[in-house]
Amino acid sequence: MEFLSNTVALSRMQFALTAIFHMLWPVLTTGMAIYLAIVEGIWLKTRNPDYYYHARFWSKLYILNFGIGVATGIPMEFQFGTNWAPLSEAIGNFFGSIIGFEASWAFMLEAAFLGIMVFGWERVHPIIHFISTILVAVGANLSTFWILAANSWLQTPAGGEMVNGKFIVHDYFQGIFNPFMAVSVSHMFLGTLETSLFVIGGISAWYIYNNRHSAFFAKAFKIALAAAIAIAPLQIYVGHLSGEQVYHYQPSKLAAMEAQWHTTPAGQPADWSLIALPNEQAEQNDWEITIPNALSYILEFKPKLSEPVLGLKEWQPADRPHLVALIYYSFRIMIAIGFFLAGLMLVSTIQWLRGKLSPENISQQRLLMLGWIFAAPLGYIAVESGWIVRCVGRQPWTVYGLIRTADAASNLPASNVLATLTGFATVYSLLFVAVLYFGSRIIRRGPRLDLPIPGLKDQPAVETTPGEFIPDERPVEAQQ
């Protein structure tokens, strides 16, 4: 009951709810926008109608995610003025500008050309439509840059100083390109791509598993797999770089990620905790399984540390992260999913090289298809887990080392915050059910293979000689 009267805790929970729910949708749209540009480009290059139908089918899921993303993103940003007004007043001249850039540069670009991408298939020249799709993808991913630049600044503030309770900017570029920015943007960009690839691959695998348009969706599956060959291992490497940055810039967060209570001094090997049960009250792990010397190799690729790994006891309880178990297990869930997806990619690639993913054989790979279906939601879980580590591990600071979370919250009646929190939880639950319903309906109905192809009259076309096309009356399954 004490929690229900704590305005700061309730405001934190409300922002966490809106952020976690909102994050579900742009994670897919940013990656899927690139996929849409790829399949449309392949269609323009080859004139194979399957790729046109892929662009039309997957764009339906894109639009659904885009709409929910907009509806849930705006209330999240309004909270900077309602629940976090002292924070906005203190850092608004920099942080507010970056959020404004995201809205005016990225969101407006994406929204402006989205209408052409959705409704312009038979109204504009195919090249104009293709350019519009590319610009939608650019806008979607530009949002990732600005949001992660803003959040990275909260993690490693740079480019100015606090003067009389307000952040005075001396160098905007130094603030934007703060120490966390490059790796954070790369990590999130790859995370959105990986999530989108395994969603596209997982949905395609569902069709293949159920013998619906198997040859048609084998194309989407192979595109997703081909991209995952590069993205999955690269994401693991960039995630490692992100962990190194935490090691150097946010040692208290690293201590919480590893549930490490005691300092390991420089010149000594550091064990890695594989699994543990953190006990914050006793300031210890009730039990744990460790791998000797593994943390030394993870952080520095050598058996002994050149810098100490500080334990949580180095800080007073008020100055270190709480909810250590949440941070600890969120970090391990993210790692486990990353390696699982990379392993699934590797197995799938081996099967591809063995010829098992050909149109004739792919339907027989039922266990592999089940693996991809199971993997479809895992990217979301990994991204959400990463953001939990990133933001909960930053506590008790909102702006790391400069502004405490307790000082950043608005002085509101707890009952008001509880009412809005309850309202958000109710509305977002209804929206989630609606998305599941409409998304599943799109998937159950499948692709429209009878749509007229722009520039080719009313029928699909097949190339007979260079530059010459004739109507193709065969079913799409036979056009492989």
Image: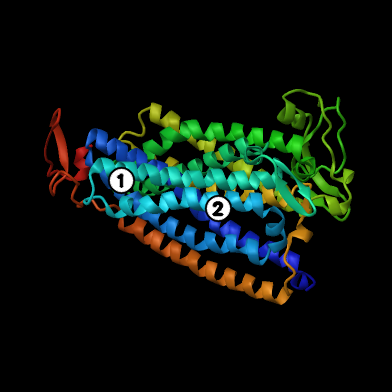
Quick check: 84 above or below 96?
A: below
Q: Residues within 10 Å of mark 2 (few under 14, many from 20)?
A: some
Quick check: 14 above or below 99?
A: below
According to the picture, the residue beneath numbered tag 2 turns out to be: 100
From the top left corner, tell me how far across and down residue 157 is, in percent. Answer: 71, 43
Rendered image: mark on residue 429: none
Quick check: 395 above or below 181?
A: below
Q: Which residue is painted at 60% across and 31% down in the image?
A: 237
Left or right? Give the position of 236 relative to 158: left
Q: Which residue is painted at 45% across and 49% down in the image?
A: 29
Left or right? Give the position of 210 relative to 162: left
**CB atoms at circles 2 and 1 under 8 Å apart?**
no
Looking at the image, is mark 2 or mark 1 nearer the viewer?
A: 2
Q: Quadrant of the C terminus?
A: top left
From the top left corner, tell me how far across and down residue 316 is, in percent. Answer: 89, 50
User: Which amino acid is tagged 1?
Assistant: His
From the top left corner, tell me how far across and down residue 440 is, in percent. Answer: 39, 59
Visible residue check, residue 333: no
Visible residue check, residue 133: yes
Within the image, what quadrant is residue 270 found in?
A: top right
Q: Residues within 10 Å of mark 1 (few under 14, many from 20)?
A: many
315 or 98: nearer the viewer = 98
User: Which amino acid is tagged 2?
Assistant: Gly
Which label's residue is closer to the chain start, 2 or 1? Answer: 1
219 or 118: nearer the viewer = 118
Which secondary structure, mark 2? helix
Which secondary structure, mark 1? helix
According to the picture, the residue beneath numbered tag 1 turns out to be: 54
Q: Residue furthest top?
A: 302
From the top left corner, tell me how far across and down residue 36 is, in percent. Answer: 36, 44
